[in-house]
Image (cartoon, rainbow, N blue to C red):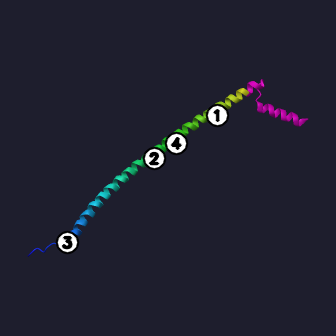
Amino acid sequence: MMAEPENMVLHLLREMRAEIKNDLAEFRNDLAEIRSEMRSMRADVAADFLAVERRMDEQEKRTSEQIVGLRRAVVEYHSVVVGHGLMISEHEERIKRLETSR
């Protein structure tokens, strides 16, 4: 049997199919790489969120400790200023009672 001469259109279609197959393989590889990078980025973002949350908790704890220290200092100051251990708020309440009783 004689081999027929190859049709030019069939030849071009076969070349296009091979190119498309190669392009599709490259696309799949690129897509897999992008997915991997996205997973890595998600892990990095999650770690960053946890680190920020820890820093905020530590800052909140320091602020609370500073407030407690400040309150203690104010109470001590009021005790010293009044002289007899009366706190200013107690002193003010006493003055209000005296004023209303007149």
Q: Secondary structure at mark 2?
A: helix
Identify the residue shown where x is 48% and y is 41%: 51
In this view of the protein, which residue sits in the foreground, 8 or 2? 8
Q: Secondary structure at mark 1?
A: helix
Viewer-side label of 2, 4: 2
Identify the residue shown where x is 61% and y is 33%: 65
In this rendering, position of residue 54 left or right of residue 78: left
Q: Are marks 2 and 4 in contact (CB under 8 Å)?
A: no
Asked if residue 101 is among those painted magenta in the image, a careful observer would answer yes
Q: Amino acid at mark 1?
A: Ile
Residue occupied by mark 3? 8
Q: Amino acid at mark 3?
A: Met
Q: CA distance from mark 1 to mark 2?
A: 33 Å
Q: Residue furthest right?
A: 102
**Residue 101 picture quarter:** top right
Q: Amino acid at mark 4?
A: Glu
Viewer-side label of 2, 3: 3
Q: Secondary structure at mark 4?
A: helix
Q: Are marks 2 and 3 in contact (CB under 8 Å)?
A: no
| Crowd tier of the residue under label 4, counting other residues whose Cα lies within 10 Å: few below 14, some 14–19, many 20 or above | few
Residue occupied by mark 2? 45
Position of residue 20 measured from the top left corner of the image (x, y, whole percent): 28, 64
What segment is highlighted magenta in the picture? 78-102
Residue occupied by mark 4? 53
Q: Amino acid at mark 2?
A: Val
Residue occupied by mark 1? 67
- Of the residues under marks 1 and 2, which one precedes in the sequence? 2
Q: Are marks 1 and 2 in contact (CB under 8 Å)?
A: no
Position of residue 71 measured from the top left corner of the image (x, y, whole percent): 68, 32
Q: Which mark is residue 86?
A: none
Q: CA distance from mark 2 to mark 3?
A: 55 Å
